[in-house]
Image (cartoon, rainbow, N blue to C red):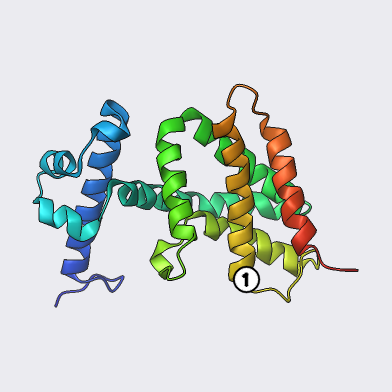
Amino acid sequence: MTKSPSGESRMDRKKEETKKKILATAMQLFREQGFDAVSMETIAETADIAKGTLYNYFAVKEAILDEYIRRNFKDRTQAWVAKMQELPDTAARMETVFADLLTGIQSQKVIFEKYTAYRMKQWMSFHQEADEKSGFQLIAAEIIRLGQGSGELRSDLPTLMLEDLCEYVFMLAVKEFYLAPETFSAPQAIGRSVEVFLNGTRKRK
């Protein structure tokens, strides 16, 4: 089997190309027609692939959205990591990341509402696979690593617990936006979420 210098086989490359095609097609349709109006059949037809092929990659539309956002997180991780390393503490890192993400959510409210509902369902699963973790956890892991490295955060708690808690308190801020968008204050919501996180994870003196 022919492999590329990166170790990927031809089949792997073809699968990745198909996945990228699905993602690009679906996101374009979601933006043009609205998430609820687009069916899996429409995505398959527009992408010119068999419906069975589409379901081999993604079981539901929300999974396509989740994969798209996860990849965006990965693409931006390096820039976020560099930014976080310049900030003084965990609170500042969380506030910066949360504010950036909330700006994106407010600009694409419907898309992120579907994504958030799907993420919460995955988050609550007790049998979550590694590839089902959100891209957010890549950022959370760096926030935690830096906080523990400086002695600010507890190191006696499982990393996964801290990552999940970081994601959960961010979701609390997001929920405030969706419940009352007219009166929503991002700085206040973020401040409350960060405080909740730090109250449970700050290293005891």
Is 86 situated above or below 123? Answer: above
Quarter of the image with the C terminus in it: bottom right
Q: Quadrant of residue 32?
A: top left
How far from the left and from the top, in percent, is residue 27? 30, 38
Identify the residue at horizontal 49%, vertical 60% (top origin): 124
49 left or right of 98? left
Is 33 situated above or below 128? Answer: above
**Mark 1 residue type:** Thr
How far from the left and from the top, in percent, is residue 60? 27, 51
Is 56 situated above or below 180? Answer: below
Identify the residue at horizontal 15%, vertical 38% (top origin): 42
How far from the left and from the top, in percent, is residue 180? 59, 28
Q: Secondary structure at mark 1?
A: helix
Identify the residue at horizontal 42%, vertical 32% (top origin): 110
Count residues near mark 1 (Cα–Cα under 10 Å), then give few for <14, some for 14-19, many for 20+: some
Is 127 situated above or below 164? Answer: below
Q: Which residue lies most toward the top here?
A: 182
**In terms of depth relative to the viewer, which is nearer, 79 or 190?**
190
Identify the residue at horizontal 40%, vertical 41% (top origin): 114
Visible residue check, residue 141: no
How far from the left and from the top, in percent, is residue 138? 53, 60
Quarter of the image with the N terminus in it: bottom left
Q: Which residue lies most toward the right here?
A: 205
Q: Which residue is mark 1?
A: 159
Visible residue check, residue 171: yes
**In terms of depth relative to the viewer, which is nearer, 86 or 90?**
90
